[in-house]
Image (spheres, rainbow, N blue to C red):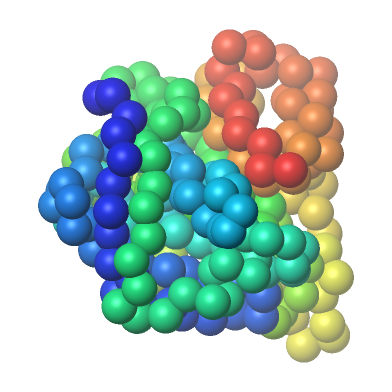
Amino acid sequence: MNPQTYTATVSSVTNVAGKFYVVTLSLASPSTITFIAGQYVIFQIGPPKLRHTLSIASSPADSKTIDILQSIAPMGEGSKWMLGLKAGDTVQFLGPLGKFILQKESPKQKVFVATGCGIAPLRAMILDYLEAGGTAAVTLWWGLRHETDVFWQNEFEAIKAQYSNFHAVTTLSQPGVSWAGQRGRVTAHVVAETPELSKSEFYLCGTRQMIVDMRGLLVHNGVPAEQIFTEAFF
């Protein structure tokens, strides 16, 4: 599908955890959007007119709304723009764009690795694949820093309860003493805890350093480069 300019209305702005915000947009003109899970849109913000790129975090199954996720930690123009949004506001964006998409027809095990807001396109991919009846094993590794950064855990638990081929692990690099889950960076876990590495596909999204480190580890351990797909956020 060719990208075009959309006008949408802000339905809600939700602080889901700490520095992370989810904005739900209802399409106005055109009234629906068709996109491939993993793609992104570019918002026009300002003045002056600046371009702000964000991945779509929701499933393509709902063509009338999209979710976007952002960390406001950088407090740049994009963060300030998002903090200024409120229900009823009108926004414009160009999209859909991007080639970071899931190989849905491949029977290979699918391993998703995210840090921070890199979860956004991976959430869309996972929902799209499972809702369409995908049968390959799906594993999500999500790296965050602190307990206060954690969100969407109940959603992923519900997905696990519905789809037996889905497994999700959140690991914290700077956890408190009360954290009962995995500890350390995602790069410390994925290789050691993924069976049949060379027969798996990997979708990496987040910090550029995580992607560089993770790709290097995977290739070193026999994963063909063509089975590694990436999207760097910064």
In the image, 148 versus 163, the foreground residue is 148
Horizontal and vertical percent position of residue 79:
64, 66
- Residue 108, placed above or below residue 78: above
Instruction: Determine the residue located farthest toward the bottom in the rendered image.
Output: 178
> In the rendered image of this protein, does residue 60 appear above or below residue 58?
above
Across and down, in percent, residue 129 comes to 30, 40
In the picture provided, is 198 more to the left or to the right than 122?
right
Residue positioned 75% across, 18% down in the render: 219
Task: Count every numbered label the image shows and give the total.
Answer: 0
Please determine whether, in this image, residue 166 is positioned above or below residue 17. Answer: above
Tell me the residue at 18%/51% (across/down): 29
Residue at 67%, 37% in the rendered image:
232
Q: Quadrant of the C terminus?
A: top right
Looking at the image, residue 227 lies above or below residue 41:
above
Instruction: Give 49 or 205, whichever is nearer the viewer.
Output: 49
Q: Can residue 141 be seen? A: no
For the question of whether residue 101 can be seen, the reply is: yes
Asked whether, in this view, residue 100 is left or right of residue 186, the answer is: left
**Quarter occupied by residue 151:** bottom right
Q: Residue lying at the far front in this picture: please name it.
A: 48
Quarter of image, res 111: top right
Which residue is located at x 44 percent, y 59 percent?
68
Left or right of residue 159, residue 34 in this image: left
Looking at the rendering, which quadrant does residue 3 occupy?
A: top left
Q: Position of residue 95 (x, y in %)?
A: 37, 37
The percent coordinates of residue 164 (x first, y second) are: 33, 53
Placement of the N terminus among the 4 image quadrants: top left
Task: Say left or right for 140 vs 29.
Answer: right
